[in-house]
Image: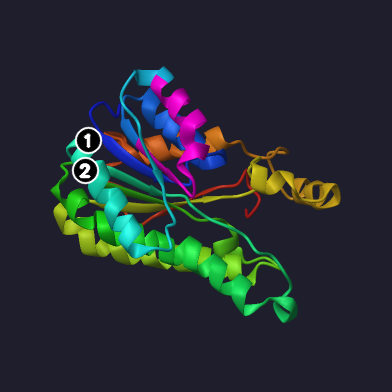
Amino acid sequence: MQLNGRKALITGASRGIGRAIAIAFAQQGAQVALAATSADRLVETAAMCQEQNKLDVAMFGLDVRDPKACEAAVKATVDKFGGLDIVVNNAGVTRDNLLMRLSDEDYDAVLDTNLRGAFNITRAASRPLMKSKAGRLINIASVVGIVGNAGQANYAASKGGLIAFTKSVAKELAGRGVTANVIAPGFIETDMTASLDAKVKEEALKGIRLGRFGKPEDIAQAAVYLASDAGSYITAQVLVIDGGMTA
């Protein structure tokens, strides 16, 4: 599943799933452009990627809610690398609360980042992806976008919307050989889940058939597969990686 010569842009790449995907892509020979809210937060990820393949890494401080900034980041990636083959929309936030306590601000913040942000990047990247001989769009959603979760109406809406968005994009870009797929992780050990109460984690673990929480690398290897030639005939699909939690 080599990615030699491929150029990839990954948002939310400073930690967790985004970092793991960037490193896994670099291990397979891809040249990576990393985006996060602050470029300073990407230095460690960039160093880890360069350890894998010695290639230059691009870093962007990027607010994915800003369409002009997304256009600039995509253009800078294409200019620096000479093209763009793979886009991973991983940037995301949570603002959890029960519906009756959920503020307009928290609802909008999650939808604007998780869904509108993916739209901004994808729209900006659509032309270079169509010019690629191996265009790949991979959007990181969540099982919450499929089954819902109490206290996460905003997050579920954003991730469910991302799934529908990806399926539509897949149909639009298929004629140019671009695949578009979703990875829907379950409970993955990241900074975002580390802050959860111990009792919440204990209850979550009871529902996972494989008896453990996932690791960012579990998601990264799936992303490598979808980005590689091995995934060239897969599009408009949702790959659930949750240890059997939603089985």
Q: Which residue is mark 1?
A: 81
> Could one spot residue 88 in this view of the protein?
yes
Q: Is residue 66 above or below residue 58?
A: below
- Crowd rating for badge 2 (residues with CA inside 10 Å; few <14, some 14–19, many 20+): some
Q: Which residues are magenta?
A: 33-50
Q: Is the stretch drawn in magenta largely helix, strand or loop?
A: helix
Relative to 170, is 197 on the left or the right?
right
SS state under label 2 = helix
Q: Is residue 46 on the magenta stretch? A: yes
Which residue appears at 29% of the width and 29% of the height? Answer: 3
Task: Name the amino acid, label 1.
Answer: Phe
**Residue 84 or 161: which is nearer the viewer?**
84
What whole-number distance in Å separates the C-alpha atoms at marks 1 and 2? 5 Å
**Which of the labelled discs sits on residue 217, or is there none?**
none
Give the residue type that dot 2 points to: Val
Q: Position of residue 206 (x, y in %)?
A: 78, 47
Identify residue for label 2. Answer: 78
